[in-house]
Image (cartoon, grey):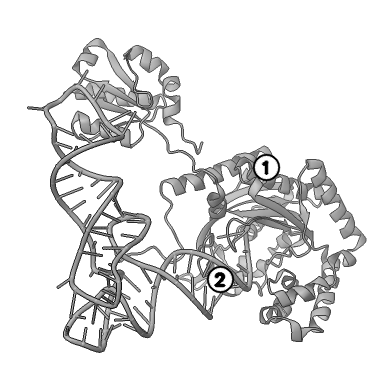
Amino acid sequence: MSSIQPVRGTHDLIGEQQRRHAHVVSVARHIAGLYGFDEWATPIFEETRVFSRSLGDTSDVVSKEMYSFNDRDGESLTLRPEGTAAICRALVTNGLTQSLPQKVFYAGPMFRYERPQKGRYRQFHQIGAELLGAAEPLADAEAIALAHQLLTALGVADDVTLELNTLGDTASRDAWRAALVAYFSGHKDKLSEDSLNRLEKNPLRILDSKDAGDRVLVADAPMMEDFLTPEARAFWDGLRRTLDGFGIAYKVNPSIVRGLDYYNHTTFEFVTRRLGSQGTVLAGGRYDGLVQQMGGPEVPSIGWAAGVERLAMLLEEAPAAPRSVVIVPVGSPDEGALLSILQTLRQQGVRVEIGYRGSLRKRMERAGKQNASHVLFLGDDELARGSFRVKNMGTGEEAEVSRDTLFSNAASMFAKAGESAAQ
RNA sequence: GCGGAUGUAGCUCAGCUGGUAGAGCGCCGGUUUGUGGUACCGGUUGUCGCGGGUUCGAGCCCCGUCAUUCGCCCCA
């Protein structure tokens, strides 16, 4: 038991866990490609203002969860707590506001100083999709369709439901917000302590309070519906119509308001009951003003992010570990011949290993334990005859195969051996 | 940041009302170097999370601390 521990809220990804993560990311990358999204990689840290400016000063993410530090020249830098702000910054910095729309996929670690829990870590991983430069509801629907197809491909769609809401445009949202503040201010005596706090910082969040008393109040609170401008209503109707066209089921939930300040119009969450209080697995919305905040022009955009850890936990089965072909020397065959055979097979794309020591029995035992698909026995007899004895470790069947046959068919013969379930 | 639970070998756990630690699995070696996943034999492993305190004596009691976990907050 070493005294060196991983930093609180961080974890190592090894074996099955790593395979689960890799699977989530590679499936996401693939599906994003089907929708025409290209992958971007932005730095893991940015100037602090990239995040503080965009997420809203009152969000917890900014006010107390950022890993910020001063660079040697005194500049404040921050380990990214989320992906969207950095993508917007990159859009502006690279002058891509001239070639819109941009459809961006990203994957990588994020950092938030929070109390760790199941499905919540200080270093965690997100995948995300951002569709920058499209104001039409079709863009929102496409982003959601991409998310939906991803969850389906991962086999978790049945455990997850899509909840959808609109915050309207700025005018709608401001009017609604004012009405909410007025309404709740009139019932301060009945509000929970948390919600009193929210009233100051982010009144919309009172709507998804879990407090029973709050919920009674919320039931009679002003509804967004009543504050939508005609334009916002048209957008909302258009989105739902398009989702219907995509054949995607959703549930309208007026309390999906999202915590980050930059959202307007569409907000949505894919939620599950299987992860305790960390039920949100993928969430996003429209952020028409964010790029402008980064110093660019107005670029209406929609996007989402998903937690890789949470998705990995929902996966029914971990991808299988890759299986190797193992060469087992018998007696003491010529080493040069052995090495050249090893490399020939590897160059043909076969996953081949050779043990470093041990008796024949030991080597077989290890090949069995590591779940090798085949064993190739190679002794002086085989070398002399120019062949191998190939043993299928699954069936136990054994056959002598000539070297020429093996080399010319290696890829197909052992296709299953090198195959990684993570693709 | 707030509240509850937990913390004994690599893993899962046992350890009765305090007397200085055990099992299973795993791991390593072997059952005479042309064959594994079965069987048999042998072996290995712990500052009982860490630091204090009470006690003749603590894995068991008390305090603190760290970590994990559940809920709140927040969020992916």
Contact, mark 2 vs mark 1 (Cβ under 8 Å): no
Residue A298 visible in image: no
Instruction: Return the x and y of residue B31 as percentages of the image width and height.
Output: 13, 32
Relative to A291, residue A56 above or below: below
Question: What whole-number distance in Å separates the C-alpha atoms at marks 2 and 1?
Answer: 32 Å
**In the image, A411: left or right of A138?**
left
Splitting the image into 4 quarters, where does residue A92 fall? Answer: bottom right
The residue at the point 61 percent across, 46 percent down is: A156
| Residue closer to the observer: A107 or A45 | A107
Q: Assess disc 2: are there few (<14), some (14-19) or many (≥20) residues with their C-alpha within 10 Å of its C-alpha.
A: some
Splitting the image into 4 quarters, where does residue A414 fall? Answer: top left
Do the dots labelled 2 and 1 sit on one chain?
yes
Q: Which quadrant would the N terminus of chain A be assigned to in this image?
A: bottom left
User: Please, what is the three-letter code of the amino acid marked with disc 2?
Assistant: Glu
**Disc 1: which chain?**
A
Mark 2 against mark 1, which lies toward the viewer? 1
Element at label 2 = loop
Q: Assess disc 1: are there few (<14), some (14-19) or many (≥20) residues with their C-alpha within 10 Å of its C-alpha.
A: some
Relative to B20, residue A418 above or below: above
Element at label 1 = helix
Instruction: Return the x and y of residue A44 as percentages of the image width and height.
Output: 52, 58
**In the image, A270: left or right of A178?**
left
Relative to A258, residue B18 above or below: below
Instruction: Return the x and y of residue A144 as percentages of the image width and height.
Output: 72, 48
Instruction: Return the x and y of residue B60 as percentages of the image width and height.
Output: 31, 76
Question: In the rendered image, which residue does mark 2 sit on?
Answer: A65
Question: In the rendered image, which residue does mark 1 sit on?
Answer: A149
The residue at the point 41 percent across, 46 percent down is: A15
User: Please, what is the three-letter code of the amino acid marked with disc 1?
Assistant: Gln
**Disc 2: which chain?**
A
The residue at the point 81 percent across, 50 percent down is: A137
| Residue closer to the observer: A306 or B55 | B55
